[in-house]
Amino acid sequence: MMYQNWIEIGQAKGLTDLEVFAVRNKSLKLSVYQNKLDQHVQSDIEVVTIRGIYENKLSSIRFENLSDTNVSEMLDQLIENAKALTVVEPAIIYEGSKSYPEVKDELFDFSSVNTLEKINLIKKLESLILKNPLCSQVQTSMYQEIDTQTTLVNSKGLNLSRHNTYAYAYAIGVFKKEEDIKTAYDVKLAKKFDEFHVEEMANKAIEKGVAKLGGKSISSKAYPTVFSNEMFSDMLEAFTGIFSGEAAYRNLTALKDKVNQKIANDEINIIDDPLHPEAHFKTGFDDEGVACKKRYVVENGVFKGFNHNLKTASIFKEEPTGNGFNGGISVTNFYLEPKVKSFDELISTIKDGVYITDMIGLHAGIKTVSGEFSVQASGFKILDGKINHAVKMIVISGNFFDILNHIKEIGSDLKFSLSGIGSPSVYVESVVIGGEA
């Protein structure tokens, strides 16, 4: 009701259409070091964005914890911002989609769990990892819970809301064998507190850390290369911008004139699916009120079209795709479609290859327009179809578009990251790897 009053005040000031987008974010962050609590941060913040059209110019203003007492002043500022605009872009307040998908997302009140129980969870996680003889210390043990409520109301009658709750925890272990030192962690995201199984979490972190020790150098050459599901997900995330209508508008993507053309081999399907059952988060509408839906961005190797918000959809005279988030364009659950082979089957035919499990500085080491990348990485040697030994720091180089055209096999082990990007393990025919001279 309060937001509707704000809209009426704005219209009385001469704004033709208005929209209120409010996000209330409650969070708790805890960290432990050497069995002592060293961080306890609790917050409850509402951030409100008001978008309004004045003299056919769209302007916005953003602030925290707005109340009825100062909304008039904020709306005056919104009008002044509109008057100052010299670049005129499509001025759109969305009237709403014909229908919206039903989102069945489990909500759990993490605040109902005693804080001491949460602290004890990460204390125990730290102690279990430290019990491993190869673990010299745990850098930090972290727990964070987030409760986000989003409301969108506008002058065209749109009134939408969504609610999401989750928590995650991890501990970063330092593992040492002689002079070889490696860090490892495994993040567990939970939709309910009883999904945290501390022994399993500790074992995964230990398994990752110990496996990295004793790495050997390898010769520089092109190898058959398997990217773990997490690493190919990271690579896909680094290049999500090339599928954006904003990048097409600004000539910042090699896909500008490639709609309905082949950009990958026939096995490649890249999908944006806001309601994927295995994804951590689900959403029925974007931040502009456009309904989200499952959509093939790449289908059987063919680029099907860009992700659009209202502005770029208007520019390209296309329908918005429900990807208007955070004032720009973002994906929802964006993933490479899995196939049927297990990881063991994926590597079984590789005689001499490399399995990539870590990449460092991926976003700094890529050129999104050209697709070129060169980043530090590490992982394991594959010999005669099996994981053999850890590999010391290497450099992998190539081109993202070339990789999409030279994927030989795709695994079945689809995994989504916390950012909503997903991938199974991927076997690429050949990747240039820099190791020993």
Image: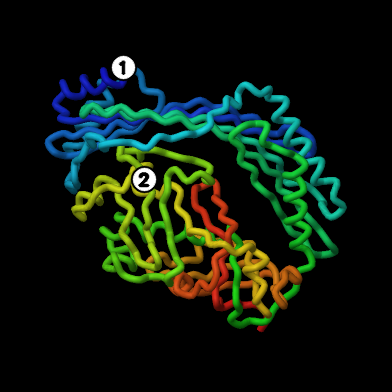
Query: Is 225 on the left-hand or right-hand side of 104?
Result: right
Q: Residue furthest right?
A: 133
Query: Is 295 on the left-hand or right-hand side of 397?
Result: left
Quadrant placement of the C terminus: bottom right
Q: Residue furthest front?
A: 340
Label 1 element class: loop
Quadrant placement of the N terminus: top left
Disc 1/disc 2 C-alpha distance (Å): 29 Å
Q: As shown in the figure, which amino acid type bears the numbered disc 1?
A: Met
Q: Is residue 4 above or below residue 146?
A: above
Category of crowding for the residue at label 2, using alpha-carbon neighbours closer than 10 angstroms: few (below 14), some (14–19), many (at least 20): some
Residue 227, x across and y down, in percent: 59, 66
Q: Which residue is mark 1?
A: 1
Q: Which residue is mark 2?
A: 293
Q: Could you tell me which residue is drawn at 40 percent across and 27 percent down?
A: 64
Q: Quadrant of residue 395?
A: bottom right
Label 2 element class: loop
Query: Is 203 on the left-hand or right-hand side of 410?
Result: right
- Viewer-side residue, 401 vs 405: 405
Q: Could you tell me which residue is drawn at 61 percent across and 37 percent down?
A: 190
Dot in front, 1 or 2? 2
Residue 214, x across and y down, in percent: 79, 67
